[in-house]
Image: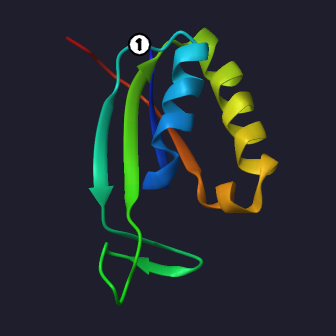
Amino acid sequence: MPKLVHIFHRFEFKEAVEAILDRQGIDSFVRLPMAEGRDKDGKHHGSQVFPGNMSLVQALVEDERVEDLLEELRRFKQSRPAHEHLRVAVVAVERTL
């Protein structure tokens, strides 16, 4: 049964996150761009007061591929201080259609 992987990141890294998904062979996902969010640096609402936005990517990933995806996302997160806001959650899926 696949897992639902949620990837939260700053919107400016959408191409980099998509490239990771491509390298991992994950060709089906949903992106919620320009979402409002908050992290350790405060609110990101896309305004002058709270600049920046967050994005959420959701993908159904087969169990055997999850660890490789997490490892590449971990390397991305650790590669630059600007990437430290990346968050990933893996959720069990009971059923799919």
Residue at x-position 75% and y-position 62% = 81
Q: Which structural element holds mark 1? A: loop
Number of labels in the image equals 1
Q: Quadrant of the C terminus?
A: top left
Q: Is residue 92 shown left or right of residue 46? A: right
Q: Where is residue 1 in the image (x, y as percent from the top left)?
A: 44, 11
Name the residue: 33% across, 86% down. Answer: 48
Q: Nearer the viewer, residue 4 or 51?
A: 51
Q: In this view, does 60 lie above or below 82?
A: above
- Tell me if I can see residue 10 in this picture: no
Q: Position of residue 20 (x, y in %)?
A: 59, 26
- Looking at the picture, the colour scheme in use is rainbow
Compared with 49, 16 (above or below) is above
At horizontal 69% and vertical 23% (from top left) the residue drawn is 67
The residue beneath circle 1 is 27
Residue 15 is situated, as x and y percent measured from the top left of the image, at 49, 36
Q: Quadrant of residue 72?
A: top right
Give the residue at the far left of this rendering.
97
Say which residue appears at 52% left-offset and 43% top-offset: 89
Tell me where residue 83 sits by quadrant.
bottom right
Locate residue 62 relative to residue 94 in the image: left or right.
right
Nearer the observer, 91 or 83 = 83
Instruction: Give the crowd class for mark 1: few <14, some 14-19, many >=20 residues within 10 Å.
Output: few
Amino acid type, residue under disc 1 in the picture: Asp
